[in-house]
Image (tube, rainbow, N blue to C red):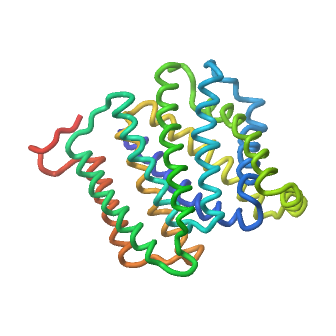
Amino acid sequence: MTLRDRLLALLVVVIWGMNFVIIKYGLQGMPPFLLAGLRFLLVVFPAILFVPRPKLPWKWLVLYGLTMSFGQFAFLFCAIKVGMPAGLASLVLQAQVFFTLLLGMLVFAERLRIHHVIGIVVATMGMLFLAQASLQTKGASAVPLAGLLLTLGAAFSWAIGNLTNKKIMATFPQQGILPLVVWSALIPIVPFFVCSGLFDGRQQVLDSLLNLQIGSVGVIVYLSFAATLLGYSIWGNLLARYETWRVAPLALLVPLVGLVSAWLLMDEALSWLQVSGALLVLVGMTVNTFGLPCRGMTTRK
């Protein structure tokens, strides 16, 4: 991976890491399905007026929209709404890395080298340290079982979206990622608004819209333009040009940004055990991306 692409991946990591604090703040004044629906509504309009529709069958747009957009964020927003701490949500969601790698081996027969396996094992140990520390935390950072399960559901949906993106880019290489992101955002809008009416209640939806605050507008703009249009355009482009084992593990850095930003902005605890886990994740990421120092154990291409 080139230095430019690594820097672009790092930019996405920071944007997505801050995403969880932004979501938690937004959910203080708006129900989850409504917030998600408005997010994708702003992704689509006005961009759809200027971005041509990708020349691929609608079934691919529907599959991408239902997995990467609707499934992932329906689960994630609900998880945070029921009490999942923002920092831990950023960590648990990265189970998508392992779901993606497993599906990549099953679907695309991709092979992992020894330093990739070692890096993933070390990073997994770090994530387990982080999860254990967070589960032991009481008070505001306590973790409900429903929140954990919903976040894992979001991670699995994201992984399917990753593989769908890769398949689309391989089958229709002439398509750009931005048209895919914009036009697939049409798919989750109606399901989100329907779910909002059914589960949030029409009165709560109406009250939220009539009392829309400037902070909520800022949240929707951030989620739409930074986290979705910019983030997924860059991420999808990287997935299309590199193997999944090169790109997907970089998302392991997202929880580091998420944990620190939640600690600084939401006063969520960051214990020494969490710091130790974060360092292990960094070590695992370094091994996975740059290889092992011993030349006899791995070769770089």
Picture residue at 54% right of the left edge, 54% below the top? 16
Q: Position of residue 278 (x, y in %)?
A: 37, 66
Quadrant location of the C terminus in the rendered image: top left
Look at the picture and state if 165 lies above or below 128.
above
Can you tell which quarter of the image residue 121 is in?
bottom left
Can you tell which quarter of the image residue 273 is in?
bottom left
Picture residue at 43% right of the left edge, 52% below the top? 95
Seen in the image, is 46 located left or right of residue 131?
right
Seen in the image, is 144 located left or right of residue 204?
left
Q: Position of residue 159 (x, y in %)?
A: 48, 41
**As rendered, which of 288 and 108 lies closer to the eye?**
108
Counting labels gives: 0
Look at the picture and state if 278 lies above or below 268.
above
**As rendered, which of 67 and 260 lies closer to the eye?**
67
Picture residue at 31% right of the left edge, 31% below the top? 110
Q: Position of residue 269 (x, y in %)?
A: 49, 78
Look at the picture and state if 175 lies above or below 68.
above
Seen in the image, is 236 located left or right of residue 181?
left
Look at the picture and state if 194 lies above or below 163.
below
Q: Residue furthest bottom?
A: 139
Quadrant location of the N terminus in the rendered image: top left
Seen in the image, is 123 located left or right of residue 185?
left
Picture residue at 50% right of the left edge, 34% below the top? 237
